Amino acid sequence: MHVVNRTAPPHSLLGRALVEAVATMLAAIATLLCVLTISPEPGAGVLAVVLCLSLSRSQLDRDRRGRIEAVFVLPAVGLAAAGVGMLLLRFPIVGAAVFTAGMFVSIWLRRFGPMARRAGSLIALPFVVLLTTPYIPPRHPGLIPPWLLPIVIALLALFWVNVVHALAQALRLLKPVTLPLAAPAAPVESSLRPVASTRMAIQMAVALGLSFALGYLVFPAHWAWVVLTAFIVNSGNRGRLDVAHKSVLRVLGAAAGTVMAGVVSIHLGIDRHVMVVLMLACVFLGVWLRPISYVWWALFVTVVLALLQDFEGVSASRMLWSRVEEIAIGAIIGVAVAWFVLPVRSTGVLRRRIADALAALASALDRQQPTRTPATFLTALHAVEQIAPAFRATRPIARYLRPDRPADCIDVLLDCREPAARLIEQGSAPAAVHQALGHARRSLREPATMLTALQQLQASLRQACAGLQMPISA
């Protein structure tokens, strides 16, 4: 599996992200143009763009199994999203209940393996469309019946994303996704009851239920901002600290984006055609800069959503500060639920992922393995990287409060990537590496010794590469 190295220099990371963003936007624009020829409705165009963004991010189209899954799942999901949108419009309480249940199921499915996880991700993604642009009954009959339109949009999105990604791969601008040759390391049995996926599903259901209720009661005209924020900050919940960190970024980015959208709407007075181009440009910038920090995605997506509402006749100037207020309330709901409803400790998630990475490294260095490849270890490191930003953001405080210094543990482990991969590819490792690896795995039971053990592992890996005359970058 191709894994992006997020510890790479910013210019290198931005270069790779630029290719991904250009490919994604080309597919989105092509899909949008096709959809607008058969249905001039704004909701259809938004669904087309969101499905392209979601499919590109999931990378489902880059292997045969993913394409087969997407062909069957995407049309069904698009149709279901349209149905739930109609319920939210005509029967709000029923629609909210169905929406919440659908999100619960999409997260709960993760416990049943990779295929169910991929299906759950696809199920969840188009529902965001319902929060960004509520369902509006078609006002102008198109070439395709309304009930069939979501299916056609989903297939068009899949087609154009496939075409653009295939072309980018042929030009060697994007790397194809390949399954790891090595068998994944046996997962560590979770001590959480209920398991983490069920806890996250319950947390999402509670957060959505509270945000729907508060939104309907306090902000009946534009409740979606509260629900959308609660949904975003709890999506991909990797522990309490991750949710709190994402909430702060969401509020800061959304506040800046709201002000920016208000300035554009009030002072520039741009027409509808230029506004569409500006929205697409903001989507591109959000996709491109998201790997650097989530705050950029929050900022530019908020600009897009605010301009979209202005595009539909809702003045951005009148909603400027109320929108920020609703976003802050949604973030508070998300943090409160993550903290008090079946909470998942972020340090527990970190130790679990470090344990998985060390187990994958031990398996890859095992001489009894018939085929050894660093793919599984690199995938496990990517899972560690996903939770790194929240710990790094709290490093100045944690330095005094936590003797285990989790952010430093992450950085040391990630620094083992290159020497470990070289040893795995070389096919042998000295006894000192195996001893340091065993000590690092045992240190997970005593967090205070984990950083020292990981530093010893890092030193042994680098020393082994130096002994084999295998230069590594500093």
Image: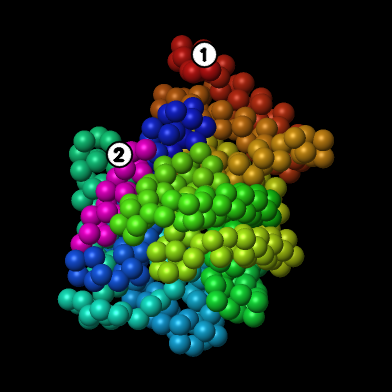
Answer yes or no: is residue 290 visible.
yes
Q: Is residue 301 above or below residue 12?
A: below
Q: Where residue 288 appears, x then y in whole percent?
A: 41, 42
From the viewer's perspective, tell me whether residue 176 is left or right of residue 116: left
Camera-nearest residue between 224 and 294: 224
At label 2, counting other C-alpha atoms closer than 10 Å, the crowd grade (few under 14, some 14-19, many 20 or more) is some
* Residue at mark 1: 466
Residue displayed at 51% across by 13% down: 466
Q: Where residue 218 appears, x then y in whole percent?
A: 65, 77
Please name the predominant secondary structure of the magenta segment in the image.
helix
Residue displayed at 55% across by 19% down: 462
- Secondary structure of the residue carrying tag 1 is helix
| Residue 174, numbered label | 2
- How much space separates mark 1 and mark 2, taking CA atoms? 32 Å
Q: Is residue 372 above or below residue 180?
A: above
Q: Quadrant of the N terminus?
A: top left
Q: Is residue 205 above or below residue 291?
A: below
- Secondary structure of the residue carrying tag 2 is loop
Q: Where residue 75 appears, x then y in whole percent?
A: 30, 71
What amino acid does circle 1 point to? Ala
Q: Nearer the viewer, mark 1 or mark 2?
A: 2
Going from N to C along the chain, the mark reached first, 1 or 2, is 2
Q: Start and end of the magenta stretch?
A: 18-34
Q: Is residue 26 magenta?
A: yes
| Residue 274, numbered label | none
Residue displayed at 38% across by 35% down: 16
Answer yes or no: is residue 182 visible.
no
Circles 1 and 2, Cβ within 8 Å, touching? The answer is no
Residue displayed at 50% across by 76% down: 99
Q: Which picture quadrant has residue 410? A: top right
